[in-house]
Image (cartoon, rainbow, N blue to C red):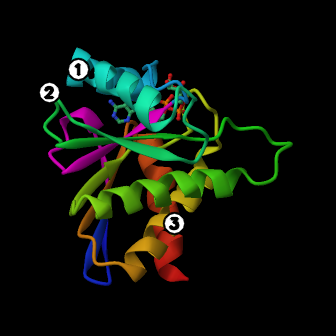
Amino acid sequence: MKIELNGNTLELMTGDITQQETDVIVNAANGTLMGGGGVDGAIHRAAGKDLLKECKQVREKQLNGEKLPTGKAVLTRGHNLPASYVIHTVGPVWNERVNNQEEQLADCYRNALKIASGEEASSIAFPSISTGVYSFPIELAAETAIKTIADFLSDHHFGHVTIVLFSDNDYEAYAAALKSFTND
Ligand code: AR6
């Protein structure tokens, strides 16, 4: 499924984000930037050891040894990936007692898009941030992702945004959110 927005495109597909030939792919990382399971593990495996080395440098130099806070994003090169760059962001760990979790998830998408624009990238692929290990409800995550990306594209000439879903169920949730967004 694909829509056009202000001369940009927003597309949903199922697949493996590590194989995307976009300028940038986004990693649903954790604050340590030292890799993990899920899409983070897949990206580190496909990019090779130099990605971890570069992540260590980012932690030391850019983050003064601190963890990357939730909602923030940093850039590295893609190393052995087809993508030129990886933007690492940390989604919120779902907790129904916390109020601003959609806002934190929206920050992930917004900050990644801002960094990609700054690098003059014109294509970016996102995974479904926070909906795996971090347990964010898929419908709410889909609605938040679509709205945030669409708002950004309405204000910027960026190019092409793809959301790469890892299962048919996840694809259906994002397709429903995109349909209800376009019908509003
Ligand atoms: N391509 C696209 N999507 C994928 C791929 C892939 N190769 N592999 C998994 N997914 P998760 P989170 C989907 O758990 O919830 C890590 O350990 C997956 O099916 O990767 O943000 C980090 O280090 C799900 O739909 O990320 C953190 O500790 C989506 O990617 C923590 O998990 C996100 O699931 C982050 O948790």
**Rendered location of residue 12, percent (x, y):** 33, 56
Report whether 180 appears left or right of 166. right
At label 3, which amino acid type do we have?
Thr
- Between circles 1 and 2, the one closer to the viewer is 1
Q: Secondary structure at mark 2?
A: loop
Quarter occupied by the N terminus: bottom left
Point 38% across, 36% down: residue: 166
Q: Secondary structure at mark 3?
A: helix
Instruction: State the residue position of label 1.
Output: 50
Which corner quadrant holds the C terminus?
bottom right
- At horizontal 64% and vertical 40% (from top left) the residue drawn is 92
Contact between labelled residues 2 and 1, with CB atoms less than 8 Å apart? yes
Sooner in the amino-acid sequence: mark 3 or mark 1: 1
User: Could you tell me the amino acid type at mark 2?
Assistant: Asn
Res 16 visible = no
Name the residue at 24% across, 43% down: 85
Residue depth check, mark 3 versus mark 2: number of the one nearer the observer:
2
Query: Which of 17/31 is in front?
Result: 31
Span shown in magenta: 11-29
Side (left or right) of 73 relative to 103: left
Distance between the alpha carbons at the discs numbered 3 and 1: 32 Å
The amino acid on which the numbered mark 1 sits, given as a three-letter code, is Asp
Q: CA distance from mark 3 to mark 2?
A: 30 Å
- Would you name the residue on which mark 3 appears? 148
Q: Does residue 144 appear to the left or right of 37 in the view shown?
A: right
Asked if residue 46 lies in the magenta stretch, the reply is: no
Please say if 157 is above or below 2: below
Which disc number belongs to residue 80?
Answer: 2
